[in-house]
Image (spheres, helix red, strand yellow):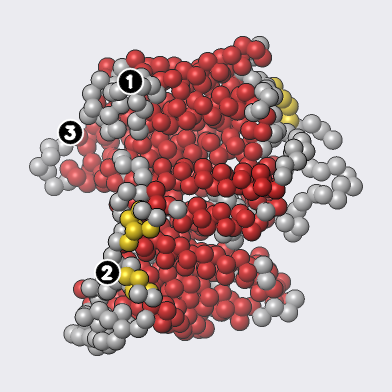
Amino acid sequence: MTTTTETTPVIPLPARAATALTGLGALTTAASAALPWTWTSDFPGDLTYTGSPAGLQWLALAAGLLVLLLLLATHGTPGLRWAAPTRSHNAVLYAATGALAVSVFSVAAIATELGGLANLEAGGWILAAGGLLTVLGALGLPLDRRTRVPLRILDRRLFLLVPVAPAGWFAAHAIPGDQAVAPVMTALAGALAIAAGVVLLLQLGHLANAWLRLGTVDRPLPAPRQLPSWAEVLIIVLAFGLGLFAITFGIDTEYGELFIGYLLLAALVVPALTRSGLLARLRALTVKHRPVTTGAAFAAAASFPFTQTSDQYTSVATNILIFATVALGLNIVVGLAGLLDLGYVAFLGVGAYAAALVSGSPASPIHVQFPFWAAMLTGAAVSMVFGVLIGAPTLRLRGDYLAIVTLGFGEIFRITMLNLNGTTGPKVTNGSNGIPRIPDLEILGFDLGKPHTVAGIELGRFSNYYLLMLLVTALVVLVFARVGNSRIGRAWVAIREDETAAEAMGINGFRLKLLAFALGACLAGLAGTVQAHVSYTVTPDQYTFAEALPPNSAFLLAAVILGGMGTISGPLAGATLLFLIPKKLEFLSDYQLLAFGAALIILMRVRPEGLIPNRRRQLEFHEAAILAQPAGDGAALTKAGA
């Protein structure tokens, strides 16, 4: 069999020199966190102190220490070999790139915010030097590389944006500000600049890929050291504790620069830990102790409100859970059954309106107040009924035609809620005013609208709703897991792959698609009942196809595709990112959605199968890159086998 990989350095350096250079850079990057990066406190986070890291300095410290840990582990340092079971230096390179990304971004942000590199103190220059040294040293280490990677060139017409963007920028700023066309031209110039930046980034990525030729050498993981069960359980608990800390840090970021630095580091730390083999080793432990893993995951999520001193970020986490729960419901429709639904947010609205009407709100024309369990069942049942009513006449359509019909349903729902105002229709929803003053829930005498003290920690209103929404999310995850692994779930996957072939094998395609539509609508309605009480008010404008902030149909579909269709953790991760990124990028003002869209384009170009795909989706996009198995090897994997 032809060898397609090799283990060679990118920069020809002696092995000891490369190791020393990488270690020196990592130590320098970490040490810079103890020095002031700038002289003024005008930069967010106040990076002027010595010996007291803040904001971006914590990211530099973490990046430097991680590079050092992986470097020592790959060289077999006793007591640290667990951090890199594969002994692959690619993990060190990814972590070093993360350190460089934090360094470059921090220096650029300080220079942009304060008006030039002259505002950098010694710590800032040491940070930049440390990040550069770390990557140069890592490139001199023996890396797993492919023997040949052809250079890909983008469509040459796209490069016309590069000279056009600066010309448009100068032309837009030459127009007097009092002219009516000035804001339009400024926005257009910004769009051209971002588009040109995206083109350059993509082409630079292709150039780097052809130069680095990074690959994966199949090294079997060495047998792990046998540990007692209690030690393995402790490792799982510690891993989820670290995960909780990392997620809490991202949600609690107070300004956009810190969040962008966090995303840059996280985007490179994950592949670094994957290449090191640490995540594979941890995954084996979680499979071995599945009940403990489930309990630890739930306990870590439930611990989040206890890490907060106010409800400021707990409200963000609560809305993330609502968004993620609805995305999981859509994942049944899109990810398992393969039905493109562009009006799915309407089912969230149906559940929210149904719960609001029976909540006891003074604005409700029904004037009844159901207990919470009855309101939840009402919202879920009404959404399911709507799912059946919409799905029965339309699910015989396929592809784009079904997408157009569901998009129409979403808009019809919003317009209908606007018209049920007592003037253009019966007075049911109060039109654009919606149903306000929805009372807080009271469950078994526990008022979720009032603060409560648990273990000496005061939990506010949003903390209470967060814990309630966590239970709802756990229920939806359970339903998705059980249904996805059942005979019905396998039939949905068969319909998604080839509906004609599935029907030829005896599967009733229409009935199963209708079941997927109804179940997805039911789960969305379930989340809608909680959302109505969290937001106090339900209005038609909350349930549109596309808006700057989720939840809306476009963001829900993006969360499923971006996270990974057909998985549980994929939509959860996708929903978290798609909710946090627009919220944290508010400082970009008019360019917020444009920058967000550019980031999505790059991400989908680099990883089209999603952040956490299942094995089948990975093979669909990367089957050609998977090395051929030797003849007669029964372990060869195909899309059908996956």
Circle 2 is placed at which residue position? 536
Relative side of 624 to 193, left or right? right
Q: Nearer the viewer, residue 74 or 642?
A: 74
Residue 596 visible in the shown view:
no
Circle 1 is placed at which residue position? 50
Where residue 488 sits: x, y (%)? 66, 74
- Quadrant, the C terminus: bottom right
Q: Quadrant of residue 66?
A: top right
Circle 3 is placed at which residue position? 174
Identify which residue is drawn at 55% across, 26% down: 67
* Closer to viewer: mark 3 or mark 2: 2
Q: Which residue type does callout 1 highlight? A: Thr
Task: Give the alpha-carbon distance from disc 3 to disc 2, as whole Å.
Answer: 47 Å
Task: Give the alpha-carbon distance from disc 1 to disc 3, as whole Å.
Answer: 44 Å
Q: Quadrant of residue 195?
A: top left
Residue 306 visible in the shown view:
yes
Q: Quadrant of residue 108?
A: top left
